[in-house]
Structure formats: structure tokens, C-alpha cells
Image (tube, grey):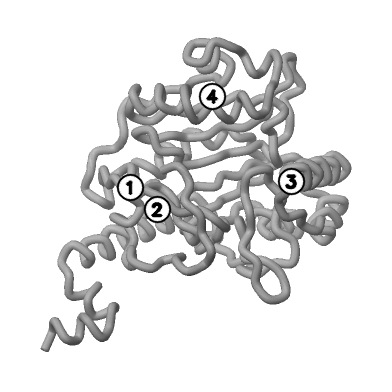
């Protein structure tokens, strides 16, 4: 009877398979550890809309269309509106979506954790992020990543790509060499590597260090070669933010990508006052992969077959 039920009902197949049950258990343990850690640090859990009218424009991220708007690629803009309304320490964990992403390390739907703290800069969040990762490793009963290293973008590119993108930024060359040369070196190094000091041309929603040189107050965390988290000292100037949105949309138009409406509600909230703050976006699926040694994102999903399929996805590298 059980094989027949498994054929007719995929959920029965999932919960009856021991390896799948272990995936469910591990995800539950990691998510519980995340919530316990952040609550212990005074953070409040919040929710934001999954369907949005204006996704945050980014050069290489495409949103999934749905009736009346798009599925969120991140809860970031709504969470910052909460900071403008007086929240000081908040986090959210839930599904986000990126159109066209499918491969060994990607799914169109993925689980994102983001947290924001008023009065902090991105470097203030490094120790907290490390302790969070260690708490998750402890909950899973696996070793925490070692060693923890910090690499500047300028030095990493000089050493592994032969040029300095902070001194002279070339966007396409930067993207290619990051993927083809720097990230393989990070993977070979092993452990946890924090890459910091991004060129101003890759600031996204981060503020710029007053310099010189003018670099983004931004870092990314890699664990065992997997990109796990992205942290900013958040830009608080609404005029500069509007300009970045418009420049990004112009670049997207040149590349033949969708152009998104500017989120006027977010910019109005910024005009009312976004406090100095820092924020981090962390991929739950990727973190679980890195800590457990999984080679494919399917290995950490409770429903690896069919998640995101049939949505017009294209294959991406890894």
C-alpha cells in the first residue's frame, strides 16, 4: 500500500523517505536556531508582502511576474519602511523569487533571511553573523566553519585576476573575474571568507565610504566557497537612492531586461527619515548546504523535485 500511496501523493513519499525526513529535520533545526539567536539579540520578527508593485531593481536579478505586480526578490524595501516607522531591530525569513534561476546552486524560489539594526554599520554586524552561523552549526551538530578570513576586493582581484577594480572599475570585467577567478580562489581557501570593500559601481543599496578610495560599505560572506550573505551599511539619502534606481533601470533597458517601476512609497519613507542602519541578506538554503556539505541545493530542500519547474526557467551556471 505504501508504494502506491507514494506514487499517488508526493507528500507521502517525502515524509516516508528517511533521507528526505532528515532534510526536513535539518531545515527545522536551522530555522529554529536562527529565530532563537535573533530573538535573543532583541530582534523582532516581521512579515512583508510576497507580491509587490515595485521590486527592487538590480542589474542581474529578474523578478517573477504575477497578477498585479511581481513576486518579491527580497523583503528589503518594506523592512526599511518599518525602520522609517520606528522599528530598530527586525528580521524576516521566508520565500523570495528570482526568474530564470535553476541549477546546482539555484532555484527560482528560495528562502531568504534578512535582518536590520538601527545605529549599526556593516562591520558592526560581522561578529553577530559569525555567532549566528556558529549557533546554526551547533543546532545541526556539525563543526562551525574554520578559519574565518577577511579579503579586500582590491587585494583579492590584484592577486587572482591581475587588476584592481577599485582603482579603475570595469563592470563586465569585474563580474567575469569575480566568478571565474576570485570565487574559485575563495573556494580553494576554504572555511569562511568575508569579501569587503566593493567598488562604488557595485554599491547597490549600500552607502559609500567617504574614502579615499570611495568603496561601498558592503561585504559578502562565503562559506566553503558558497556565497551565503550580503551586508550593507544602508544608504539613507533618498535623492541618491532614486538616482541609483534610475541608473539601474537604464542599464537593464540597455541589456533588454524588464524595467521596474520605482517604489515611490519606499522613497517617501526615506524622505521622512531612514535612520543610520545596517542590514544583511542571508540565503537559508545555501547556509544549510555549506554547513552540511551538500553538493546540490536539491539536497537541502524538502521538495527537491518540481520546485520552481514549469515557470519558464533557464539554466544558469551552478
Looking at the image, which residue is at 76% across and 41% down? 251
35 vs 177, left or right, is left
Lower position in the chain sequence, tag 4 or tag 1: 4
- Badge 3 is on which residue? 252
Q: Is residue 113 above or below residue 142?
A: below
Q: Quadrant of residue 265?
A: bottom right
Looking at the image, which residue is at 45% across and 28% down? 183
Q: Are marks 4 and 3 in contact (CB under 8 Å)?
A: no
- Badge 1 is on which residue? 289
- Quote the CA–CA distance across marks 3 and 1: 31 Å
Looking at the image, which residue is at 48% across and 47% down? 316
The circle drawn on residue 167 is: none
Lower position in the chain sequence, tag 4 or tag 3: 4
Q: Quadrant of residue 51?
A: bottom right
**Residue, far bottom:** 1
Query: For this rendering, which residue is in front, 263 or 30?
Result: 263
User: Badge 1, how many Cα within 10 Å: few under 14, some, many 20+?
Assistant: many
- Badge 2 is on which residue? 285
Query: For this rendering, which residue is in front, 64 or 203?
Result: 64
Lower position in the chain sequence, tag 2 or tag 3: 3
Amino acid at each position: 500500500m505504501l508504494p502506491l500511496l507514494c506514487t499517488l501523493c508526493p507528500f507521502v513519499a517525502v515524509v516516508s523517505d528517511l533521507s528526505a525526513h532528515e532534510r526536513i529535520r535539518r531545515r527545522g533545526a536551522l530555522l529554529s536556531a536562527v529565530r532563537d539567536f535573533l530573538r535573543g539579540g532583541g530582534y523582532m520578527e516581521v512579515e512583508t508582502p510576497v507580491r509587490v508593485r515595485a521590486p527592487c531593481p538590480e542589474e542581474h536579478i529578474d523578478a517573477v511576474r504575477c497578477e498585479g505586480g511581481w513576486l518579491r526578490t527580497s523583503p528589503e524595501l518594506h523592512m526599511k519602511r518599518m525602520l522609517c516607522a520606528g522599528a530598530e531591530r527586525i528580521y524576516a525569513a521566508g520565500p523570495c523569487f528570482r526568474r530564470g534561476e535553476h541549477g546546482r546552486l539555484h532555484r527560482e524560489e528560495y528562502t531568504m533571511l534578512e535582518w536590520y539594526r538601527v545605529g549599526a554599520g556593516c562591520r558592526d554586524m560581522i561578529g553577530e553573523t559569525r555567532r549566528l552561523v556558529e549557533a546554526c552549526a551547533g543546532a545541526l551538530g556539525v563543526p562551525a566553519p574554520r578559519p574565518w578570513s577577511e579579503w579586500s576586493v582590491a587585494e583579492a582581484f590584484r592577486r587572482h585576476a591581475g587588476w584592481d577594480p577599485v582603482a579603475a572599475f570595469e563592470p563586465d570585467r569585474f563580474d567575469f573575474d569575480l566568478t571565474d577567478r576570485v570565487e574559485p580562489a575563495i573556494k580553494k581557501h576554504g572555511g569562511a571568507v568575508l569579501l569587503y570593500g566593493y567598488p562604488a559601481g557595485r554599491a547597490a543599496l549600500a552607502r559609500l565610504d567617504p574614502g579615499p578610495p570611495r568603496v561601498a560599505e558592503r561585504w559578502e560572506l562565503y562559506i566553503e566557497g558558497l556565497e551565503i550573505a550580503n551586508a550593507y551599511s544602508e544608504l539613507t539619502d533618498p535623492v541618491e537612492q532614486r538616482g541609483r534606481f534610475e541608473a539601474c533601470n537604464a542599464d537593464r533597458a540597455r541589456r533588454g531586461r524588464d524595467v521596474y517601476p520605482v517604489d515611490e512609497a519606499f522613497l517617501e519613507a526615506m524622505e521622512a527619515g531612514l535612520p543610520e542602519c545596517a542590514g544583511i541578506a542571508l540565503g537559508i538554503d545555501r547556509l544549510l548546504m555549506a554547513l552540511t556539505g551538500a553538493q546540490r541545493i536539491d539536497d537541502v530542500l524538502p521538495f527537491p523535485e518540481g520546485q520552481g519547474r514549469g515557470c519558464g526557467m533557464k539554466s544558469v551556471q551552478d
